[in-house]
Amino acid sequence: MRILVAGKGFIGTSLGERLQEDHQVEYLDRSGADYQRDITQAFNLDHEFDVLIHTIGLAPGFKDEDEYRRVHVSGTRNLINCVEADHVVYLSALGAGEVDHSFFRTKKKAEDIVRDSEMIHTIIRPSTVSGR
């Protein structure tokens, strides 16, 4: 399977390392990736993937509402519109749409974008993520 992992942070890198044992894994990120793109800007990607795993996001409580909207909402819309894949897996957040904070509101809006796409989708809502 050809998999595109969007985001080379802790979660994206860890997932990619596990998946590359059995699949062709490529990365999209602002730097240090197979495809260096800023998802807050529209872009072109001339490759097709079986799965897009969207792990790009900002930590809760550290940014203002405009920044969350730019990355979570506009960035997700750009990924969905610019990456051709059969299935998208979106890493959201526990409490998306339920907690009255811009982080959770924008995560919910991103979920809606994923749901409204024509791709088969899986939305994961983890709570706290920890690791090395």
Image (cartoon, grey):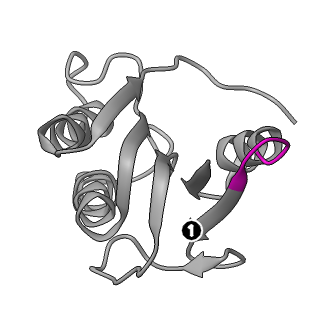
Q: Quadrant of residue 7?
A: bottom right
Task: Specify whether residue 22 is painted magenta.
Answer: yes
In the displayed structure image, the side of residue 72 where residue 49 appears, left or right = right
Q: Quadrant of residue 24?
A: bottom right
Q: Residue 56: horizontal and vertical position, in percent?
A: 49, 52
Choose between 21 and 5: the one closer to the eye: 21
Which residue is drawn at the image coordinates 48% and 50% (left, top)?
Answer: 50
Task: Specify whether residue 36 is painted magenta.
Answer: no
Which residue is drawn at the image coordinates 60% and 20% (left, top)?
Answer: 128
Viewport quadrant of the C terminus: top right
Crowding at label 1, few (<14), some or many (≥20) Cα neighbours within 10 Å?
many
Check disc 1 and give the amino acid type: Leu
Mark 1, residue position:
28
Which residue is drawn at the image coordinates 30% and 70% (left, top)?
Answer: 82
Q: Residue 110: horizontal and vertical position, in percent?
A: 24, 43
Whether 126 is drawn above or below 40: the answer is above
Q: Residue 57: horizontal and vertical position, in percent?
A: 46, 49
Whether 90 is drawn above or below 31: the answer is above
Q: Residue 99: horizontal and vertical position, in percent?
A: 25, 19
Choose between 10 and 81: the one closer to the eye: 81
Which residue is drawn at the image coordinates 53% and 17% (left, top)?
Answer: 127
**Residues shaded magenta:** 20-24
Whether 85 is drawn above or below 128: the answer is below
Mark yes or no: residue 115 visible. Answer: yes
In the displayed structure image, the side of residue 45 where residue 74 appears, left or right = left
Choose between 112 and 93: the one closer to the eye: 112
Predominant secondary structure, magenta span = loop
